[in-house]
Amino acid sequence: MSGPALTHIDSAGEASMVDVGDKTETVRVAVAEGFVRMKPETLALIREGNAKKGDVIATARLAGIMAAKQTSSLIPLCHPLMLTKVSVEIAPDDALPGLRVEAMAKLTGRTGVEMEALTAVSVACLTIYDMAKAADRDMEIGGVRLVSKSGGRSGDYRREGDMR
């Protein structure tokens, strides 16, 4: 099985942090998404602001932003980054039913922000689960994936089709 070499494996087969010192600084943006599926009654509880732990959506948004800023502390080979923007949008979806989460991370730098966007979505989803679990332990977190990324040597990427 042959394919692109893994960038975080050195010539001895050991995990190592990639040296990005020679890369050109470019504007880099990544968008990720995910969802938390729940009972319709749980979604209504969150919409009405009646969850026991407080405002689920506002808290999850802040948790996602904070998580993006801590990505290099959570994922061993990620570089610490000076993010210039992180946004987390959370929207109710009656068809799911549940909440859809989208995060965007941005910087001007030498390495991408995909992991920061994915971390923001993951932690926002976990926070939603934590804050609503008293009402619904059957919630499901899913669909966490990179939607798009721009900037850098590898160019732009946009997910094709809907895999939900």
Image (cartoon, rainbow, N blue to C red):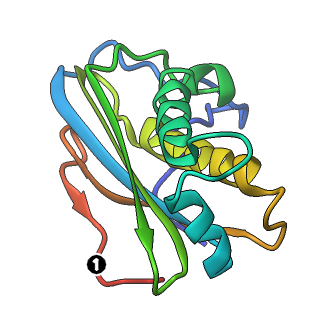
> What amino acid is at disc 1?
Glu
Give the residue drawn at x 55%, y 36%.
Answer: 59
Rendered-image quadrant of the N terminus: bottom right
Q: State whether residue 66 appears in this view.
A: yes
Check disc 1 and report the residue beneath it: 160
Give the side of residue 129 with respect to residue 6, left or right: right
Q: State whether residue 144 appears in this view.
A: no
Q: How many marks?
A: 1
Residue 36 image position (x, y, % from top left): 60, 66
- Quadrant of the rendered structure where residue 8 is? top right
Give the side of residue 142 with respect to residue 62, left or right: right
- Quadrant of the rendered structure where residue 84 is? top left
Residue 141 image position (x, y, % from top left): 66, 65
- Quadrant of the rendered structure where residue 138 is? bottom right
Q: Is residue 110 above or below residue 7?
A: above
Residue 19 image position (x, y, % from top left): 44, 19
Q: Nearer the viewer, residue 114 or 48?
A: 48
Give the residue drawn at x 55%, y 29%.
Answer: 67
Residue 153 image position (x, y, % from top left): 21, 39
Give the residue drawn at x 65%, y 76%.
Answer: 41
Give the residue drawn at x 75%, y 47%.
Answer: 130
Q: Nearer the viewer, residue 121 or 110?
A: 121
